[in-house]
Amino acid sequence: MTPALEPEASRSIRSPQPVFAFLAVTTGAQEGAIVREMRLANALHHRGFNVIVYWLMDRNPTLPAADIRQRVLARSFRYYMRKPSSLLEAVSWILDIFPQRARRRYAFHHPDLVIRFLRNLVGSVSRDDPDPGLVSRLGRFMARDGVTHVMPTFAMVCPLLRAAKERGRHRFDFLATFQGEEIFASHIEKSEGLEDYYRELRRSVEASSWPACIVSRDYARRLSEEAGIRPDRMTVIYNGIDLPQPSDDKPAFGVIESKWPWIRRDVPIVTYFGRQDSEKGIDLLLYASRMLQDRNVAHQLVVCGGVSFGKYYHEACKQIGRHLRLRVIWHRHVDDEFRTALFAHSRCIVCPPIHDEPFGMVAVEAMAQGTPVLVPDRGGITETIGANGAVGGLTFRAWDTASLAEQLEKLLTDDALHASLAANCVSVARSFGVEAMTDRILTHMGLPLGPQSAAGEA
């Protein structure tokens, strides 16, 4: 059951213990960043900490645990114009009469609208005095809820928190987390706007009591070079996943057949799972699949996952697949049971992004089911396929379809190689558990770990 969203005027909470507010930025899709944040929120909640979620833009209210309190801080239509509009935001409340699925479908067919919201939001936080109305509202929320620590999904919104902290009307602190800022920077149209954005990120990192949390070593290097974040103001803490319980039983293949009765058990499944947006490089995988088809390397190609920025790239990839005469199983959102079964029964999971992926959540989740992965040799995603001397996947040369096809062929045809990688997958994935991530974040902030810890997980 979807939990109720509390009104602004709900009762204050007074507690000597930390009260965590997650400033959750999302278009409503289940992007890796919002999934990571809600896993952290749930882990803190289960340890007995007081947790609340403030939604910004859209919301995905089923991700937090059912008894975590949730509020809407601001809605997308606040950023329909270049200057934030409280009037348009107020009128947009009527959209609540439509279910989330309908709103998500509308966004899928109107990608320019989502991009417009994001561009204007980024422009707003890039100013010296970012969105004063929202900063005031955020301060009221935190004061009424007794918030002591704020965990933003993206560092992009940290200028709002810096401004609220500087006003001094409510004492709190925040931990800046970087896990995909280049997506927002890509919506800035002019070079001077990009420098303003980076300046506000640097100011926000300096305003926090702790070095910013960065999700990989490679990403920390890039943020230093591109955004000018000081290395001593960053610490690397890898993302965490919910580790499956140890079991000798593999999820039933029938879970997949119930949705796709035409899928074959005797042909290896090659899966892409994740956002179907342009930076994810799905077209590279399509070209590689055609190369393997020409070499008579048998496989079934599955492309599965939602979108954050509309239908354009998804539809373009489907057209490419038709031109290449590929038989591709296309699907968007699936539930957790189906995703787990798909990971477990795929020969391999391919993650072919064309940007330097900060982390690789899907790669870790696939390895947790014992399935090898194939990732590019650039970006933080390469750091996810190995741990403690064990390796659970292969890399290909970034942007190189021929290299992707070559490595994919190895995974499809070399049974000994595949078996050796598969044998390492679960142990590699266990190094990226959500409990270990939670321990590291709390330790970094100088807070108690709570009644549970990640002992024995990593």
Image (cartoon, grey):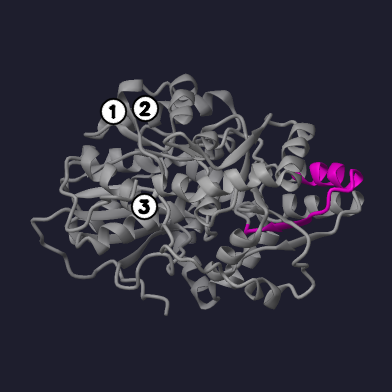
Give the amino acid type for the residue marked by disc 2 in the picture: Arg
- The secondary element bearing badge 3 is classed as helix
**Residue numbers of the magenta segment:** 285-306
| Residue 434: image tag | 3
Q: Secondary structure at mark 1?
A: helix
Q: For the point 41% across and 36% down, which residue is it?
A: 388
Give the percent coordinates (x, y) of residue 210. 24, 34
- For the point 21% across and 57% down, which residue is it? 452
Of the two numbered discs 3 and 1 in the rendering, the one whose residue sits closer to the viewer: 3
> Sequence order check: which comes first, mark 3 or mark 1?
1
Dot 3 and dot 2 residues touching (CB under 8 Å): no
Q: Quadrant of residue 291?
A: top right
Residue 169 in view here: yes
State the residue lying farthest toward the front. Answer: 416
What SS does tag 2 mark? helix
Of mark 3 and mark 2, the one earlier in the sequence is: 2
Mark 3 residue type: Val
Disc 1 to disc 2, C-alpha distance: 6 Å
Marks 1 and 2 in Cβ contact (< 8 Å):
yes
As drawn, 262 above or below 293: below
Pick whichever, 141 or 78, lies toward us.
141
| Residue 137 visible in the current orientation | no
Q: Position of residue 85 (x, y in %)?
A: 46, 53
Which quadrant of the structure image shows residue 306?
A: bottom right
Residue 136, compared with residue 235, is above or below; it is below
- Where residue 325 sits: x, y (%)? 91, 53
Residue ID for mark 1: 206
Residue at image mark 2: 202
Q: Position of residue 446 (x, y in %)?
A: 17, 40
Q: Amino acid at mark 1?
A: Glu
